[in-house]
Image (cartoon, rainbow, N blue to C red):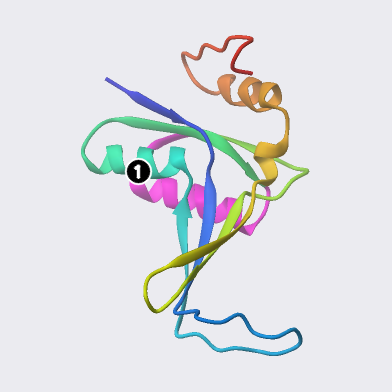
Amino acid sequence: MKTVCLGILVADVIGRPIDTVPAPGTLQLVPSITPHIGGCAANTGIGLQTLGIETLVAGKVGRDGFGDFVRAQLEKSGAQTAIAVDENTPTSATMVLVQSDAERAFLHCTAPTRRSKATISTSICSMVPLCFTSPDTV
């Protein structure tokens, strides 16, 4: 049975440790800054695929480097994809600032999901073999 994970796809940029934010106009070095995939649809879909459950991940990204990264990570996971590419907005992204004590702070841009739910649902459902929407959810 195939599972469809439909929702937000996010490029996460994680920096650690970041215990202070630099003053304007200054530079602060950190030991690690790494890209990761995030978002409920991506994380759930990759997790299910890793467990051996055939999964299709559906969502929307922008036509940019973060969108390319998200699509590549989903492809690498082995999950099937139905990803709409929005020419006019950037990919949703989160900067994760991880402190030495593992506490986190987040800066997030929800770009493609700011567009109307109807537009997102229509563009993605056109790519998914069996997709139902109701007026209450779009």
Nearer to us in this view, 37 or 95: 95
The picture quadrant where one finds residue 99 is bottom left
Point out the stretch of residues depicted in magenta: 63-81
Q: Is residue 111 above or below residue 28?
A: above
Q: Residue at x 76, y 87 (%)?
A: 25
* Residue named by callout 1: 46
Q: Position of residue 28 (x, y in %)?
A: 60, 88
| Amino acid carrying mark 1 in the image | Ile
Return the residue nearer the eye: 40 or 42: 40
Q: Residue at x 37, y 70 (%)?
A: 102
Residue 134 is inside the magenta segment: no
Instruction: Please state the horizontal and vertical placement of residue 34, each as a whole percent of the image.
Output: 46, 70
- In this picture, is 90 found above or below 103? above
Inspect the magenta stretch and tell me whether residue 70 lies in it: yes
- Relative depth, front residue between 94 and 121: 94
Q: Tell me the element at label 1.
A: helix
Residue 61 point in image, percent of width and height? 62, 43
